[in-house]
Amino acid sequence: MRILLQFPEGLKQKGLELAKKYEEEGHQVFLSASPCYGACDLAIEEAKLIKADKIVHFGHNKFVKTNVPIPIDYVPYYIDIEIRSLKKVLPYIKKFKNIGLVTTVQHVHQFEDMKAFFEKNGKTVFAAKSERATEIGQVLGCDAGALMKVKNNVDAIIFVGSGMFHPLALDVEKPVFGFNPNDKTVKELNAEIEKVKKRRKGAIAKALTCKKFGILVSTKIGQFNITQAEWAKKELEKRGFESFILIANEFDPMAINNYMEFECFVNTACPRIADDQEKFGKPVLNIEMLRQLFEIIDANR
Ligand code: SF4
């Protein structure tokens, strides 16, 4: 079989070892060297060009549910956490009874154990499934549905995982505590989440002065959304703004800023692109933010 292996950045270091395994099994192996950010980002074009029989996508579970023109094997990369180390979280949630629990794909295989731990310690744990995720309790940087669905039932939220990429998607008015399984530390994350929310509001305020909008459409299979882009263009033009749709696989700030006339970008791709406002040097609005911009404009007409 001709197989294209695809790894997120953090797993590329294991790429050769895994490639050899597939080769020893008699397959013809190719390695995708493109950056890979999520299961939204399948190397379909590369696979088609090399006539691969399938893609083996490491590090994520299934995200794209329809219209994938080639078989995909998803191989998540699970990292075990020491369940009893969750006791470090308990002092932080002492006064809360009902908690929402979320984690990332790396730890979701232990979600039931984590849940059982907090239940044994007197908590009622609420959990749900995000639309784009495969497992209960799993959040993605673009889909915190696992939390949003239970947010009204909970007093506090526990996020198990490292880094801020996922917690920044947890847009709730409840205390959020992050447990980092690597160094076993606990941190209240609300201040960081608030900072991002403020930055988004600042971007909307800046966009109020803009007249020329570039609408970003990514060709990544799980991010492609031309319908949304065409809606944005129509709505912008209805309000007297100039806009064009920009297509790329990945949006390099330098390359798109060579279209110097655009004053603001509307992002229909990975919503986390909008958190990198400073790299673009111009406001970047996700569709939700664009809707808020329209509300302000329409209210002031
Ligand atoms: S957060 Fe962005 S990169 Fe991650 S799965 Fe969602 S769209 Fe893809």
Image (cartoon, rainbow, N blue to C red):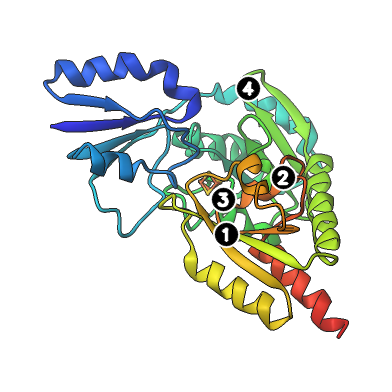
Please report whichever mark, 2 or 3, sits nearer to the chain's N-terminal start.
Answer: 3
Amino acid type of the residue tagged 3 in the rendering: Cys
Q: Residues under labels 4 and 3: Cα distance?
A: 33 Å
* Disc on the earlier residue, 1 or 2: 1
| Upstream in sequence: badge 4 or badge 2 | 4
Q: Amino acid at mark 1?
A: Thr
What's the residue at 83%, 45% (across, down)? 195
| Label 2 secondary element | helix
* Residue designated by label 1: 268
**Neighbourhood count class around disc 3 (C-alpha, 10 Å): few under 14, some 14–19, many 20 upward:** many
| Mark 4 / mark 3, whichever is N-terminal | 4
Q: To which residue does mark 2 refer?
A: 280
| Extreme residue toward the bottom, this view | 301
Quadrant of the image containing the C terminus:
bottom right
52 or 81, which lies in front?
52
Estimate how packed mark 2 is, as few (under 14), some (14 to 19) or many (20 or more) residues with alpha carbons within 10 Å. some
Q: Secondary structure at mark 4?
A: helix
Residue 85: mark: 4
Q: Secondary structure at mark 1?
A: loop
Cα distance, mark 4 to mark 1?
39 Å
Rendered image: mark on residue 128: none
Of circles 1 and 2, which is in front?
Answer: 2
In three-dimensional space, the C-alpha distance between marks 1 and 2, rounded to whole angstroms, equals: 15 Å
Cβ of mark 3 under 8 A from ligand 1 = yes
| On screen, residue 295 above or below 86 | below
Q: Position of residue 78 (x, y in %)?
A: 44, 28
In what quadrant of the picture does the N terminus appear? top left
| Separation (CA) of disc 1 from disc 3 | 7 Å
